[in-house]
Image (cartoon, grey):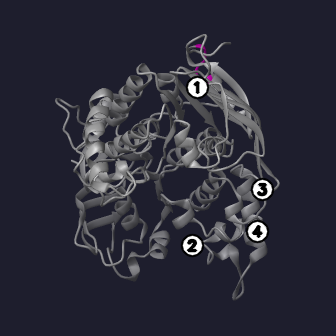
Amino acid sequence: MALAGATGTAPAIELRGISKAFGPVQANRNIDLVVPRGTIHGIIGENGAGKSTLMSILYGFYRPDAGEILIGGQPVTISDSQAAIRAGIGMVFQHFKLVPNFTVLENIILGAEDRGLLRHSLSRARGELKRLAEEYGLQVDPDAAVEELSVGHQQRVEILKALYRQADILILDEPTGVLTPAEADHLFRILRGLKDEGKTIILITHKLREIMEITDNVSVMRRGEMVASVRTAGTNPTELAELMVGRKVLLRVEKTPAQPGAPVLEVRGLGMVDADGVERLRGIDLEVRAGEIVGIAGVAGNGQTQLLEILGGFPEPGARLQGEIRLNGTPLPLSGTGADGRARRAAGIGHVPEDRQVEGLIMDFSAWENSAFGYHDAPQFQNGLLMDNAAIRADTADKMQRFDVRPPNPDLAAKNFSGGNQQKIVVAREIERNPDLLLIGQPTRGVDIGAIEFIHKRIVALRDAGKAVLLVSVELDEIMALSDRIAVMFDGRIMGERLPASTTAGELGCLMAGLEPAAAPATSGGTE
């Protein structure tokens, strides 16, 4: 099938036989890729499929071991990012490369100044920035400090930086991961405008819905190889998921209606002021019942992290807390030894933290050591005064088999597993302790489609076993698919609660942005 795009013109990008190895690991193997000029081209694949390595080669971070790069039909050597910029390539990273206390204008010209004539550079850039903003709908205050901008506006600055450097090709890595639905829609309008002006865009994302909505063509990578490149209009999410994983994948969450029981978690008036005097939580009221999943929706940085940390027993040092937390009707202390992680686990709380590599695992330790963290004093792991390491290894091997951790080697260091398999190790450790309440933050962050399917099934199975689940995710699709009730957080407050069946992504997006949608339906159940 021919790709969508202008005929009779050289492709914006052509990669021929690109290969790259890191020691014994073949990250890219004989990759061919054609990106027609003036199109939006999606690249998808599981974790470790080689997408990031391929784009790093195109942007000059890595040199390929073999192969050829053509830009506009002409062979080029891209030795570093400056060479990529000279070739007309710009890249917007998932984690922005901006100086927070610099202004927008200062960030735009950083690295592109006129040989020390800073005043002249700023003056010229101001005029060019105004032109670009008007032409592409990228309005942003040039004198605003970047740290004062919303995430969506910071992303505009990154795009303007690339356009200021005269990029004709833009690479965007997971661009909607930190955006509200409204901000994502605006970004797509910007990308369509850029395409209409003749720009070529490569979009790396794991969200198949976005691929179908915004791209003209999509290429699929699996295990370092390019397995397909097709017109988006000629495919569908199910086919793309199967190409990514190599097997059929269930894209929807299958679950029966919840049968909520008695309240397991009750939070009343929970407030937090951090060590710097910043109010992070403002009077949180929340309830999670047995046999239900309550999802917390919101853009990252609006208090969800602090809420999970307090409930899990490790609030930020120096924070001042107020309010009340009850588990199965019993008050839990907010401070002191009775409020730490060990006490929370003993009370019946399991916790899958948001950042598995920092808070959930010790990366240099083995899988069996990580599998026992927090539960090493369990009776089945004891042998007199010592831990029974053989029992822990056997238990870990059993978990690895049931949770499909690959490779199923308890002695392998955590850092040697893929992100999805690291997540499975943490999820198995917490779920297998049969907690009354499971706190789970960003359960599928950086996790590929096959592992997402598996983790979702385990969360639903825990709910169906009569347990309470509090889910925090920045993925709105995940929140809507898994949750029985949804609470939306903004600026440390709960803006409202909704039932998935009676709300929309647009309505939730308004709440996530701190706006109250007109005539929004209320929930039944939960807090009054």
- Mark in the foreground, 4 or 3: 3
Q: Are marks 4 and 1 in contact (CB under 8 Å)?
A: no
Q: Is residue 249 above or below residue 442?
A: above
Residue 12's label in the rendered image is: 1
The mark that comes first in sequence, 2 or 1, is: 1
Q: Residue at x 36, y 77 (%)?
A: 317
Residue under pointer 3? 408
Residue under pointer 4? 393
Q: CA distance from mark 4 to mark 3?
A: 11 Å
Q: Are marks 3 and 2 in contact (CB under 8 Å)?
A: no
Specify whether residue 253 is in view.
no
- Dot 3, how many residues are within 10 Å of its Cα: few (below 14), some (14-19), or many (20+)? some
Q: Amino acid at mark 4?
A: Arg
- Dot 2, how many residues are within 10 Å of its Cα: few (below 14), some (14-19), or many (20+)? some
Q: Position of residue 133 (x, y in %)?
A: 29, 34
Q: Amino acid at mark 2?
A: Gly
Magenta stretch? Answer: 234-238
Q: Are marks 3 and 1 in contact (CB under 8 Å)?
A: no
- Dot 4, how many residues are within 10 Å of its Cα: few (below 14), some (14-19), or many (20+)? many
Secondary element at image label 2? loop
Residue under pointer 2? 374
The mark that comes first in sequence, 3 or 1, is: 1
The mark that comes first in sequence, 3 or 2, is: 2
Secondary element at image label 3? loop
The mark that comes first in sequence, 4 or 2, is: 2
Quarter of the image for residue 32 reads top right
- Mark in the foreground, 3 or 1: 1
